[in-house]
Image (spheres, rainbow, N blue to C red):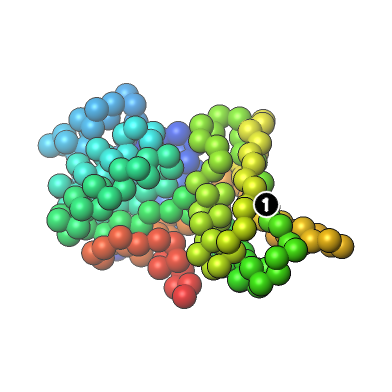
Amino acid sequence: MSVRIVLVGYGRMGKAIDALSADHGCEVVERLDIHNNRHGEGIDSPSLPVADVAIEFSLADSVASNIEKLAARGIDVVVGTTGWEAQEEEVRRATAAAGIGVVHAANFSLGVNLFQAVVERSAALFARHDDFGSWIHEGHHAAKRDAPSGTALALRNAMQKMGYARDIDVSSTRAGRMPGMHTVGYDGPFDTITLTHTARDRATFARGALEAARWVRGRRGWFSMRDVLGID
């Protein structure tokens, strides 16, 4: 049985998810954007088709309200929009009260999430060597609004949680149509080590979002892509 999907946000990511949905056992039953969901009216509408999961890639200012409205309707949510995390605690409370499942990730690429696990291991190793400094550099298309990216911040947080207590310089590039690049580097007195993930196609993010939608259907709680992928 197909997972019935509502797309909340129909920009580049929404269209990429739409194009791949049938290949991943999903059916898009509604597409909401600024024209039919400017103030959440599309989610509130009694004519909204029956849906199992909403995939939210809209604007940061709309995320909290959209998720709370979806939770009130009992629709599980996959959310990939970044830049709204200051409101996360109140959104978590609303979704917990509604008893829905949420997968929240800064990046849905399966490769990026496996890359983060590799970065965590590297941070634990280099944390023991004070003479190695570290940095993160990320690059995205010129239209991406937030900088640093949510993924870069997640990588920095993951490194710190693994015991890397020294400063981590984070920088960004916004140019052209770059789909996404993240490099984590360590530099010591005599050598440099770099780990890089480069997205070659936006389809990698769409595929991950659809995998998350299939996984979260019918679950309760707040999850990450680590849960979806079974990464310890």
Residue at mark 1: 135
Tell me if residue 178 comes above or below residue 220 in the rendering.
above
Q: Between 188 and 122, which is closer to the camera in this rendering? A: 188
Q: Quadrant of the image for the N terminus?
A: bottom left
Residue 88 visible in rendering: yes
As drawn, which residue projects farthest toward the right?
190
Name the image quarter holding residue 184.
bottom right
Q: Between 87 and 126, which is closer to the camera in this rendering? A: 126
As drawn, which residue projects farthest toward the bottom?
232
Tell me if residue 186 comes above or below residue 106 in the rendering.
below
Q: How many marks?
A: 1
State left or right for residue 106 relative to residue 182: left
Q: Amino acid at mark 1?
A: Trp
| Residue drawn at the location 54% of the way across and 43% of the way down | 149
| Residue drawn at the location 44% of the way across and 62% of the way down | 225
| Residue drawn at the location 62% of the way across and 45% of the way down | 170
Name the image quarter holding residue 144.
top right
State left or right for residue 225 relative to residue 90: right
Q: Position of residue 197 (x, y in %)?
A: 66, 55
As drawn, which residue projects farthest toward the top?
35
Residue 110 visible in rendering: no
Q: Position of residue 15 (x, y in %)?
A: 46, 39
Tell me if residue 120 comes above or below residue 97 in the rendering.
below
Q: Position of residue 112 (x, y in %)?
A: 57, 58
State left or right for residue 132 relative to residue 87: right
Q: Position of residue 173 (x, y in %)?
A: 66, 36
Tell me if residue 28 comes above or below residue 60 in the rendering.
below
Q: Between 221 and 190, which is closer to the camera in this rendering? A: 190
